Every structure is written in C-alpha cells, then in structure tokens.
C-alpha cells in the first residue's frame, strides 16, 4: 500500500511557524530584560547624590544642544513627505495638480514682469525740475 509520507520537520509549516514564534518570544524577552536593566540603571544614577551633575558650559544651554540635526534635514523630510503624497495620488489628479502649479508659476512670472516694468518706467521718466527764483 502506498501511504502518504509524513513531512519532515524542515518541511512542516507548523513546526516552522512555531520555531519563528519561539524565536520572536526569546527576542521580546531579551528586549524587555535590556529595557528593564537600562531603566534601573537610569533610576540609580538619578537617585545617587554623589553623582556629578554639572550645569552646561553655557548655563542656559540644554545638555543635548550640541546634537543638532544635520543641515538639510528639514528639506529632506519635506521632500520625502511630498514624494509620499505624490505616490498616493492617482495619475489624473497628479496631472491636474501639476497643471495648477504651472498656472500659478505663470501668474507669479506675469506679476513680477508687470512690477519690473513699473519700476523701469519710473526710472526712465525725466524728473520735472522747476527753477525757483532767488531774490
């Protein structure tokens, strides 16, 4: 008789899943243990009156004021946000928004041209000078 072969432990999806769950549980336990140790260490340092706590070099400065964000981080974050918004929009709406932005830029260009023409007109007009008789 042909009997179905029993799956080997490596081929058994249930045993693979249980192994992954066991691994995840061990990792979670390790992370909780490390976090608990870090919290206990921080509490011990805070309650230790002999610990050296000096004010920052410039008394008003916060201790982590030197750890500022790299230059351009805000621009990168804005660009990433815009890219995410662009990816979420359907192509038709993206085309409409692109056309709207194009029209706004053309309007801004026309306003700048109009203003520059007015400034140039003021410069080219001769100034009226009137002779004042001195008595």
Image (tube, grey):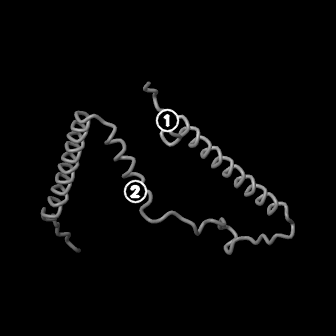
- Callout 2: SS: helix
Quarter occupied by residue 98: top left
**How packed is label 2: few (under 14 Cα within 10 Å), some, or many (20 or more)?**
few
**How packed is label 1: few (under 14 Cα within 10 Å), some, or many (20 or more)?**
few
Q: Position of residue 130 (x, y in %)?
A: 17, 66
Residue under the point 54% across and 38% down: 17
Which label was assigned to residue 76? 2
Q: Quadrant of the N terminus?
A: top left
Distance from label 1 to label 2 (Cα)?
51 Å
Single out the residue that lies furthest toward the right.
49
Quarter occupied by residue 104: top left
- Callout 1: SS: loop
**55 or 48, which is in the foreground?**
48
Quarter occupied by residue 129: bottom left
**64 or 127, which is in the foreground?**
64
Residue 20, above or below 30: above
Q: Quadrant of the C terminus?
A: bottom left
Residue 105, above or below 37: above
**119 or 52, which is in the foreground?**
52
Residue 129, above or below 35: below
Which label was assigned to residue 7? 1
Q: Position of residue 134 (x, y in %)?
A: 22, 74
Q: Position of residue 61 (x, y in %)?
A: 65, 67
Residue under the point 34% across and 47% down: 83
């Amino acid at each position: 008789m042909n009997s179905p072969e029993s799956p080997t432990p490596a081929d058994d999806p249930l045993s693979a899943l249980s192994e992954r769950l066991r691994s995840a549980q061990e990792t979670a336990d390790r992370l909780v243990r490390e976090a608990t140790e870090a919290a206990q260490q921080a509490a011990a340092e805070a309650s230790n009156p002999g610990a050296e706590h000096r004010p920052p070099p410039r008394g008003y400065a916060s201790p982590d004021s030197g750890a500022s964000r790299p230059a351009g981080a805000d621009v990168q974050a804005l660009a990433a946000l815009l890219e995410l918004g662009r990816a979420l929009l359907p192509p038709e709406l993206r085309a409409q928004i692109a056309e709207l932005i194009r029209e706004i830029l053309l309007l801004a260009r026309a306003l700048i041209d109009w203003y520059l023409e007015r400034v140039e007109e003021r410069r080219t007009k001769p100034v009226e000078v009137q002779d004042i008789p001195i008595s």
